[in-house]
């Protein structure tokens, strides 16, 4: 029996509901851990007597480790079997989370995060591949709706849960909360997931050690560069410049080697698939922008509005409600609009949400961020579901694990860039607006002189001499200038994100139409 016949005839024995719950438990807990520890970093730093900069390695090293083993997912499945490898990754992730929770010092914490990342990095491509293989072609949009809900909602509620656990219990529970999910996922995967014939019959090729070396160097240097670029002045710093050069060289060598290697770690020939290529570009940029918006809102609320970490995390919660609405919308309108039209609707909606954020000011109430958040969450999920369906619609089941690994690796890079873009955009725009406003704070400016005189008079009435009162007034006005320039910077960053999303619309029409029923 040929591989093509096996691919068409094989169906999982367990119900799709049980398979979906099993893999989504693993996916949810992995994505949750990309953001849940962020709000606890200063508490962990205090426990281990380390600086805030050093505590950032808890996040950085996890993201690096997640990306390192991810490209080897396909090879590991062919050697150990996908089900066994999936179970191993869940177990490694759970045990490592427990180690992080009981870590007696910073060194043990870092070691635990490394192994947690190695185990967690493969969970998403494995879950995605299993879902796409288990569901028939005409129901893959439904599978991606469920999958998209998990990967969208988890990073949103991560800061909320992390903030509550840290405030009411301790930072240790930020890691312990993963254990129930891992235990449940391990049991359900062991009971309901099975390897299809083309996985069981797969013959393991020689491991691409050189490709793995280039990959590790590229990912490690790139992640450290984007995490530390802002505070070091980006490429004005020799340290960041060296990391950038090494990362670029390693990336070029990786692509060159993988294209000529007989048994590559990453089969880049998948990019010959038109839908996969442009779908990956769209989702990578979209996720980069999404992670940027998720990161920028807490900074705005904490730095300018005075919110604590829990409230700023809670403010992002409505985005999850928007995602749930999007799942229902895409399911109800698929026959009416089609996948490409749904993707365009999602991009426009996401952009509108960003533009609404760009109109906020310092007099807003907590509820003012609710509607834009719902719209952004709705738009994000409305793009992910149809675009992912188009992306994988013409990928064969034998190529699914490799395709999912490649796509998620590139998406992780986009998320890293998107998160780091927040500091760069806010800092750059803030400097521009400061320069613009300072030019108007001169003795030749009548409004400025009137403001100084008015404030000085109030300080004089409080018993301050006129010279000191004038200096205090000027200092207070300058503080307002910094606040307003920072506000303008945040708003301009949202406008930049809105434009980036709109630019993606022409790429959608480069995706080939896909009719799932015809492919089934």
Image (tube, rainbow, N blue to C red):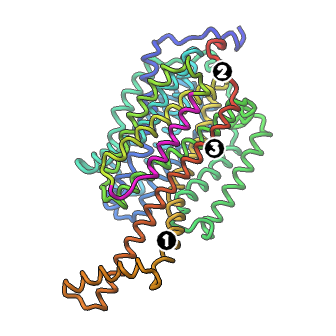
Q: Earlier in the sequence, mark 1 or mark 2?
A: 1
Residue under the point 37% across and 76% down? 477
Q: Is residue 188 above or below residue 354?
A: above
On the image, the x and y values in percent for residue 413 come to: 59, 46
Q: Is residue 93 visible?
A: no
Question: 152 or 366, which lies in front?
Answer: 366
Whole-Å distance between the Cαs marked 1 and 2? 50 Å
| Dominant secondary structure of the residues highlighted in magenta in the image | helix
- Label 2 residue SS: loop
Mark 1 surroundings within 10 Å by alpha-carbon count, few (fewer than 14), some (14 through 19), many (20 or more): some
Whole-Å distance between the Cαs marked 2 and 3? 22 Å
Q: Are marks 1 and 2 in contact (CB under 8 Å)?
A: no
Choose top left, top right, bottom left or bottom right for residue 77: top right
Residue under the point 54% across and 64% down? 428
Q: Earlier in the sequence, mark 2 or mark 3?
A: 3
Mark 3 surroundings within 10 Å by alpha-carbon count, few (fewer than 14), some (14 through 19), many (20 or more): few
- Label 3 residue SS: helix
Check disc 2 and report the residue beneath it: 514
Q: Earlier in the sequence, mark 3 or mark 1?
A: 1
Q: Is residue 322 above or below residue 227?
A: above
Q: Going by the image, does 266 lie left or right of 354?
A: right
Q: Is residue 357 rendered magenta in the image?
A: yes
Check disc 3 and report the residue beneath it: 503
- Magenta segment boundaries in residue numbering: 342-363
Q: Is residue 252 above or below residue 304?
A: above
Question: 479 or 78, which lies in front?
Answer: 479
């Amino acid at each position: 029996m040929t591989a093509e016949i096996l691919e068409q005839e094989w169906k999982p024995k367990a119900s799709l509901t049980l398979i979906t719950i099993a893999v989504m438990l693993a996916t949810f807990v992995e994505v949750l851990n990309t953001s849940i520890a962020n709000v606890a970093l200063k508490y962990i730093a205090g426990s281990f007597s380390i600086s805030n900069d050093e505590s950032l390695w808890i996040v950085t090293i996890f993201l690096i480790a997640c990306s390192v083993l991810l490209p080897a997912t396909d090879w590991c499945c062919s050697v150990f079997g996908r089900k066994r490898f999936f179970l191993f990754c869940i177990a490694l992730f759970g045990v490592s989370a427990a180690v992080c929770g009981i870590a007696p010092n910073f060194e043990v914490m870092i070691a635990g995060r490394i192994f947690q990342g190695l185990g967690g990095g493969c969970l998403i491509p494995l879950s995605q591949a299993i879902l796409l293989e288990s569901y028939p072609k005409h129901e893959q949009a439904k599978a991606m709706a469920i999958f998209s809900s998990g990967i969208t909602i988890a990073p949103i509620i991560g800061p909320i849960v992390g903030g509550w656990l840290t405030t009411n219990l301790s930072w240790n529970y930020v890691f312990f909360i993963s254990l129930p999910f891992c235990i449940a996922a391990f049991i359900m995967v062991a009971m309901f997931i099975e390897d299809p014939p083309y996985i069981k019959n797969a013959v393991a090729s020689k491991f691409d050690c050189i490709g793995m070396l280039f990959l590790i160097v590229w990912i490690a240097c790139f992640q450290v560069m984007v995490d530390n670029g802002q505070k070091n002045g980006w490429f004005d710093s020799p340290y960041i410049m060296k990391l950038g050069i090494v990362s670029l060289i390693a990336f070029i060598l990786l692509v060159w080697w993988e294209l000529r290697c007989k048994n590559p770690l990453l089969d880049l020939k998948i990019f010959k698939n038109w839908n996969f290529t442009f779908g990956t570009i769209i989702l990578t940029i979209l996720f980069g922008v999404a992670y940027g918006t998720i990161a920028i809102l807490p900074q705005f609320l904490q730095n300018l509005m005075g919110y604590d970490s829990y409230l700023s995390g809670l403010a992002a919660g409505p985005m999850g409600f928007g995602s749930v609405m999007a799942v229902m919308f895409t399911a109800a309108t698929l026959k009416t609009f089609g996948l490409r039209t749904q993707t365009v609707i999602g991009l426009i909606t996401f952009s509108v949400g960003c533009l609404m954020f760009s109109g906020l000011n310092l007099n807003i109430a907590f509820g003012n961020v609710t509607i834009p958040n719902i719209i952004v969450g709705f738009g994000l999920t409305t793009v992910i579901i149809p675009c992912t369906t188009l992306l994988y619609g013409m990928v064969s089941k034998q190529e699914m694990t490799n395709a999912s690994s490649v796509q998620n690796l590139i998406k992780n890079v986009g998320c890293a860039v998107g998160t780091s873009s927040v500091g760069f955009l806010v800092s750059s725009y803030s400097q521009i607006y400061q320069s613009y406003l300072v030019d108007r704070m001169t003795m030749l400016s009548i409004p400025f002189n009137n403001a100084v005189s008015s404030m000085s008079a109030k300080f004089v009435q409080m018993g301050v001499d006129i010279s000191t009162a004038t200096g205090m007034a000027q200092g207070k006005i300058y503080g307002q200038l910094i606040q307003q320039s920072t506000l303008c910077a945040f708003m301009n960053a949202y406008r930049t994100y809105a434009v980036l999303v709109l630019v993606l619309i022409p790429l959608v029409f480069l995706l080939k139409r896909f009719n799932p029923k015809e492919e089934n």
